[in-house]
Image: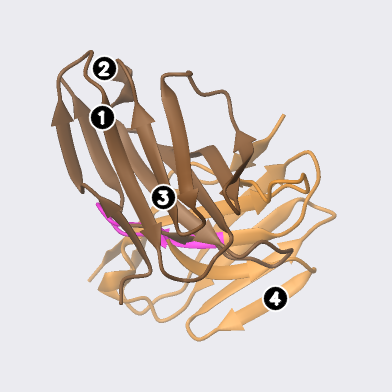
């Protein structure tokens, strides 16, 4: 089966750093994606990891350890607009480039 | 200059009706998808088409039928709507390839009364 776990909710303070974890157990692995989804809007692409290590993109970084089936999304210098759901998704290596999504982590940034 | 567009944005209908949702992408992508996001915000793949050919068909009731007239369009037709079909339906597209990223449309909120 396919299983992707993320915490349901997190709260952090404006200006702080927050780490959102994702663990996965899937029938193979062909890359891990993080998406941001504001309430009532479409998911938007944040980052992609296929090799172990850290990918940095401005205030957002994403880390992957394939041997541990683990990823995290790190958000620095939090802003109020970062309040959103963060979705972890794994691509499984079948013929269809299918993404399996976790249930998402709802992040609330407080002043 | 919208990348992935869907119509309608909101759809309210009675049980038993038939309805369609349309999706178009102007990104030149080869692959298009339909996802369902339920009230618990779980985003689940339903269908995928690559160059008008069906490549993913998850365990979805056969009341749901996707149609791809060309590679820029993927429509979703739903027959005999049920209460449990109420959800947000997202269309997405990507280039076929090992590093493709999926880009999502704005979603269609379907409410079945």
Label for residue A54? 4
Q: How far apart are marks 3 and 2 (CA)?
A: 21 Å
State whether the magenta stretch is mostly helix, strand or loop. Answer: loop
Q: Distance between the residues labelled 2 and 1?
A: 14 Å
Magenta stretch bounds? A34-43
Along the line of sight, the residue nearer the viewer: A26 or A11: A26
**Residue receiving disc 3:** B91
* Residue A6 drawn at (x, y percent): 54, 46
Which element type, helix, strand or loop, lies under badge 4? strand
Rendering colour (chain B): brown
Q: In which quarter of the image is the C terminus of chain A?
A: bottom left
Q: Work out whether disc 3 and disc 1 sit on a shared chain.
A: yes
Q: Mark 2, mark 1: which one is toward the viewer?
A: 1
Residue drawn at x 25%, y 29% as measured from the top left = B19
Its colouring scheme is by chain
Residue A102 magenta-highlighted: no
Rendering colour (chain A): orange
- The residue most toward the front is B69
Mark 3 Cα shell of 10 Å, populated few (<14), some (14-19), many (≥20): many
**Residue receiving disc 2:** B83
Q: Which callout, 3 or 1, points at the residue further toward the start of the chain? A: 1
Please state the chain letter of the residue tagged with numbered disc 3 in the rendered image: B
Q: Which callout, 2 or 1, points at the residue further toward the start of the chain? A: 1
Residue drawn at x 73%, y 40% as measured from the top left = A25
Q: Which callout, 3 or 2, points at the residue further toward the start of the chain? A: 2
Q: Work out whether residue A93 can be spotted.
A: yes
**Residue receiving disc 1:** B19
Compared to A58, does B64 lie above or below?
above
């Amino acid at each position: 089966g396919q299983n992707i776990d993320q915490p349901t909710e997190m709260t952090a303070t404006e200006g702080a750093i927050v780490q959102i974890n994702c663990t996965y157990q899937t029938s193979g692995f062909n890359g891990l994606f993080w998406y941001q989804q504001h309430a009532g809007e479409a998911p938007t692409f944040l980052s992609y990891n296929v090799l172990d290590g850290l990918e940095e993109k401005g205030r957002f970084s994403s880390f992957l350890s394939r041997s541990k089936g683990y990823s995290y999304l790190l958000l620095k210098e939090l802003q109020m607009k970062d309040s959103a759901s963060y979705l972890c998704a794994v691509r499984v290596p079948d013929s269809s480039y299918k993404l399996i999504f976790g249930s998402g982590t709802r992040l609330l940034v407080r002043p | 200059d919208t990348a992935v567009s869907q119509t309608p944005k909101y759809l309210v209908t009675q049980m038993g009706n038939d309805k369609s949702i349309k999706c178009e992408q102007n990104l030149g992508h080869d692959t298009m998808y339909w996802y369902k996001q339920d009230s618990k915000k779980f985003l689940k793949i339903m269908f995928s088409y690559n160059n008008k050919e069906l490549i993913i068909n998850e365990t979805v009731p056969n009341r749901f039928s996707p149609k791809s007239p060309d590679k820029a369009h993927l429509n979703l037709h739903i027959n005999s709507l049920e209460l449990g079909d109420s959800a947000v339906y997202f269309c997405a597209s990507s280039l076929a390839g090992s590093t493709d990223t999926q880009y999502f449309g704005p979603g269609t909120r379907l409410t079945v009364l």
